Image: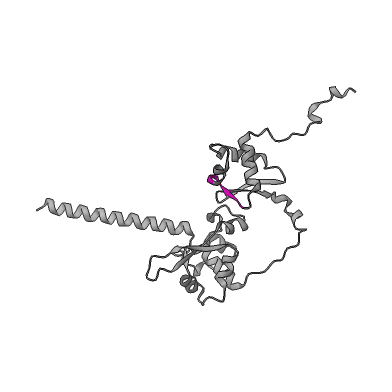
Amino acid sequence: MNKKNLDKNSNIVNFPSKLTSIEKEIEAIIFAAAEPLDVDTIESKLSKKTSIEKSLIKLQKEYSNRGINLVCISKKWSFRTSSNLSNLMSKEKTVEKKLSKAAIETLSIIVYHQPVTRAEIEEIRGVAFGTNTLEILMELNWVKPGGRKDVPGKPIQYVTTDDFLSHFNLQKLSDLPTVDELGAAGLIDTTSVDNAIFGSGKFYREKQEDKKEDIYSNIDEMLNSTLGNEDNK
């Protein structure tokens, strides 16, 4: 049989569709980066100004069925080994150090109560900090200072980092199991949990927003009352 008559589809490997010059630049920039990059950083390195969101989504789709995937964690992009091939990487020798019970408890408290101060962590745990407990978590870059609390003494508050999300393969904090889910799994006793203080950074931001709204509504009521009294004079 003449080779020219062969079905081309049975002899051609389907490579990814052709990339534009900008998409190639984006691909190269992310590949060469030592750490995940946000959109602004990627844009700043391109040869010309462009909106790259669509290009990133296209590249992510192109790499979705390959050994290397383009992933976005906490709004930062990087290439990662495909999760279904992670067993190949286990051939590398790694040295693992287990976290102490105190470090695990401290990390858990920060994760679910952030932003939280050192004194608040000790109050929740019921014991004082051991040596270097917080420092170990900060060395791992899972925890970092997150500003100061607006109370006397201005104590430092602690929050989790993007590296924490990346290490535990989380897109965002709200992907963490809730109180009810932890209770259903038998990991905590929900009867002893105060839901009023149990939450995440989002929880505290929402509480702060509610507090501001209450303040504004109180001001409105005060002004309306004052104006009403003046009208009656």
Q: Is residue 205 left or right of residue 74?
A: left
x then y, percent, for residue 94 = 73, 63
Direction right: furthest residue: 1
Residue at 50%, 76% (x, y): give it: 126
Q: Residue furthest left?
A: 233
Q: Is residue 151 magenta?
A: no
| Front-most of residues 190 and 157 | 157
Scheme of colours in the image: one colour
Q: Residue at x 54, y 43 (%)?
A: 44
Quadrant of residue 138 within the rendered picture: bottom right
Decide: is 173 above or below 158: above
Left or right side of 32 for 87 = right
Q: Nearer the viewer, residue 40 or 44?
A: 44
**Image coordinates for residue 185, horizontal then vertical, percent:** 60, 62
**One can see residue 75 in this view:** yes
Front in this rendered view, residue 189 or 110: 110
Within the image, what quadrant is residue 39 found in?
top right
Left or right for 4, reference 96: right
Residue at horizontal 38 percent and vertical 55 percent from the top: 209
Quadrant of the image containing the N terminus: top right
Tell how many labels: 0
Above or below for 220 versus 106: above
Position of residue 200 in the picture relative to residue 103 (left or right): left
Residue sitting at 42 percent across and 56 percent down?
206
Q: Residue 214 at what x, y percent from top left?
A: 32, 56
Q: Which residues are magenta?
A: 35-40
Q: Position of residue 141 (x, y in %)?
A: 58, 62
Residue 114 seen in render? no
- Between 11 and 198, the one lying in front of the other is 11
Dividing the picture into quarters, in which one does residue 163 lie? bottom right
